[in-house]
Amino acid sequence: MNQDDQGLEHRLDRLSRQLSAIEQRVAALESEAVTGDRLHRHRPAESPADGSRDEPGRTAEMIPLIGRTLLVLAGAFVLRAITETGTLNQVAGTALGILYAVAWFIMADRAAGKGRDMAAAFYGLAGAIIAFPLLAESTIKFNVLAPGSTAAILAGVTAIALAVAWRRNLMWMAWVITLGSAATLVVLAVATKALFLYIGCLLLLGVATLWFGYIKKWKSLGWTVAGLVDGAVLMLGIIMVMGETGKVTEILNPYAMLALQLGLVVAYFGSFAVRTLTSDEDVRAPEMLQGAAAILISLGGAHAIAVRGVASELLPGVVSLVMAAGCYSVSFLFMDRKLGKRGNFIFYTTSGLAFTLAAVIALLEGGPQVYALAGVALFISWLGGTRERATLSLHGAVYILAAAAGSGLFASAAKALAGPVVPGIAWFASPVLAVLAVAAVYCWFPVATHGRTWSDGISRIPKFLVLATFALGLGGIAVTVGAVVLPHGEDGVISRAALAPLRTLILGVAAILLAWVCRFPRLKEAAWLVYPVLIAGGLKLLMEDLRGGRPMTLVVSFALYGGALILAPRLVRRSKQLN
């Protein structure tokens, strides 16, 4: 009997060990299943999935879900049939249809919460298929909803669905809802002619998905919608500018168009600034491209509309001025304190440059416009010299070149140096003299040449351009003043034979002076102009002096040009030895 008890105890002990081993094995398998499911749920949606794993199981799960989705859609058609037969009125039927679609978004949320991502995908897709066509049809075909009501309901439905996608980290659902909502907005805008209402909603959707991209790292979603927004606003602007003024203004309100254009640039640049200031992220190529597109589409379109005389440039000018101040403030107050953020600094300062030019062009014209550009150029170039920022020196040069173009300096100086007739002295009035004065001061400011963004040679290009502008302006003035004392013909026009030696003299003296001033370290760039000026003088000698000159004038021209060819290179070599 004792032997039987011992055998029984032995068998019970062995059975207990086997059960423990089985329990451990089951626990291990459950742990692996849970881990695998979590990995599947949290795997980035853009990475390719392993199609060979669990394919039979996926197929077995997918087939019932397709059937369930068809039943969901059948329920929607039941609601539509009841509505069409008059059992429900159109308003009640539409309301029940929207609630029915929202219910399936909630079902998608619950399914995703339980780890059933595939079921959530089908439920979310079913809700989108029901909601968006229903809203479009109720507004366009049945006139149940007014455009404003449709926009509000569509915004609410989209917000609920995107909230589910946000909460459960379902990027595929965000794509479905976003593209469905965007397509519905475009269809409604075209069909109802409520263009600004629905394109404005599209702009809000674009900003929302932009932040989805920033926070959830679904960046391609935000940039896709940004492209749609840009295209929509651009098309409206083209219609406004290219269409007949009377017909266009009947359909499109110019001030609503301005509000939409300015909203585009403010919304995206505001988002860029908030994101930059609240994180350590750099501005990337997509932000740069979208920023450039927003400026061109918004401010360029606003200027084109104002040129047609259907709207004022006051509002775009004020907004551009505020945006310029904001961009420069972000650059100096924040970006300059973060080492290694050169890309951010360049992006915001360049944007500030574009906004400043747009503001000055929109708000001012003539002499005040030139004075404003010259004043901004003086301040920015001084700041670039003191803060050792070659980027700001470049901006100062751009402002000076813009002021020179606005004052007529380039055109008048070119006529004086190479035109058949020398313009009168009235062309170098106070705006031109102001530009030349600022250009002279700019040339004396130091330029940073040791930065990591700009090399020594590239950082000197802006000063070279300003110095060339200054030399061109002085040369044009010298020819204009010298032409006053030259003999005039009976028709009051100076003969080419008399004008050619004067121009040769001015070019020769310019080459010598440039070769002399390049000895100063701050004016080293003058050496780059010496040989171009000498080449221009040689071409002028061939094209003008030889063709229309007389023996006596040719003697003077050749003597002057020969002396410049000898003296200028020698001075350049001495200046290089001194530096």
Image (cartoon, grey):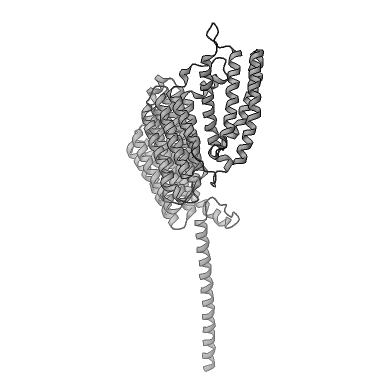
Vertical order, 528 against 283 (above or below): above
Residue 418: x %, y % from top left: 58, 19
| Of 145 and 494, the residue lying toward us | 494
| Of 281 and 328, the residue lying toward us | 328
* Residue at position x 36%, y 29% in the image: 314
Q: Quadrant of residue 415?
A: top right
Whether residue 315 appears in this view of the structure is yes
Residue 537: x %, y % from top left: 62, 24
Residue 270: x %, y % from top left: 40, 42
Question: In the rendered view of the protein, which quadrant contains the C terminus?
Answer: top right
* Residue at position x 49%, y 16% in the image: 424
Q: Quadrant of residue 180?
A: top left
Residue 426: x %, y % from top left: 46, 18
160 relative to 536 in the view: left or right: left
* Residue at position x 44%, y 54% in the image: 168
Work out which residue is located at the far top of the displayed protein and give it.
490
Count of numbered badges drawn on the protein: 0
Work out which residue is located at the far bottom of the displayed protein and give it.
2
| Of 505 and 103, the residue lying toward us | 505
Vertical order, 543 against 207 (above or below): above
Vertical order, 403 against 336 (above or below): above
* Residue at position x 66%, y 24% in the image: 562
Whether residue 208 appears in this view of the structure is no
